[in-house]
Image (cartoon, rainbow, N blue to C red):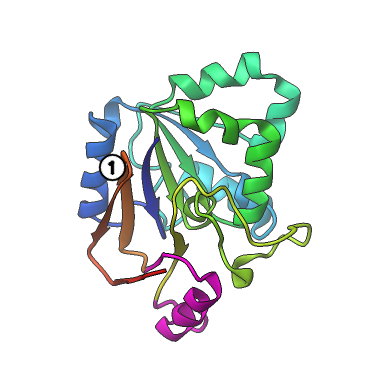
Amino acid sequence: MKLLLTSAGVQNASIRDALVDLLGKPIADSSALCIPTAAYPMGGPASAWRFITGQTPLPMCDLGWKSLGVLELTALPSVGEERWVPWVREADVMLVAGGDATYLCHWMRQSGLADLLPSLRDTVWVGLSAGSMVLTPRVGADFVEWQSAPDDRTLGVVDFSIFPHLGLEPDNTMAGAERWAAEIAGPAYAIDDQTAIKVTDGTVEVVSEGHWRRFPA
């Protein structure tokens, strides 16, 4: 897949330009599916509704898409792959909400979406916070809120971890990021809300109008 891993959505012109580049066409000509699943353990139904309707300061669903649908992962096992797989394949982009990355990881596996990802070569994945972190190998214990999570491991689609919302007091300080990186013990990035990580064909590019830091393995 083509990845745009954000901390807080499409916050500035640089991130928006990166999104359009990944799409290969204007946003207004692109069809999107939004995935609110990660929001439920932390924010509940009101948080999911705000994400879907664009009633947040985190630009994702309200960017002016040609079409927008909701892909709720917890429903997919009962819908059947013959129904939902074509929906995913026909979409240009998936917009993935924040919340708890381990809960999202669980339902990506249970639904079958995780297994489908390698075949979606032209689809763009735009993650917001946990929606980005779910594609990394680990999120770190501090970012696990779901009580049923066995550990902090996630899908490992990319080989680096992400510390989002850098600079957001009191927890997401650079000192906190340094402690987190020591626990992760692998390549990682700390990114603020004006930063995203663009991944195409294994090439990683930081897109930023803010602050970020790379931690080597």
Position of 14 with respect to 180 (left or right) is left
> Which residue carries the number 1 mark?
19
- Is 199 above or below relative to 87? below
Residue 216 x/y as whole percent: 37, 70
Visible in this render: residue 169?
A: no
* Of 100 and 33, the residue lying toward us: 100
- Is 8 above or below relative to 113? below
Quadrant where the image shows the C terminus: bottom left
Position of 23 with respect to 158 (left or right) is left
Verify whether residue 38 appears in magenta: no
- The quadrant where residue 139 appears: bottom right
Residue depicted at x 55% and y 28%: 116
Magenta extent? 167-190
Verify whether residue 174 appears in magenta: yes
Residue 101 x/y as whole percent: 59, 55
Residue depicted at x 22% and y 38%: 21
Residue 183 x/y as whole percent: 55, 75
> What's under tag 1, amino acid-wise?
Leu
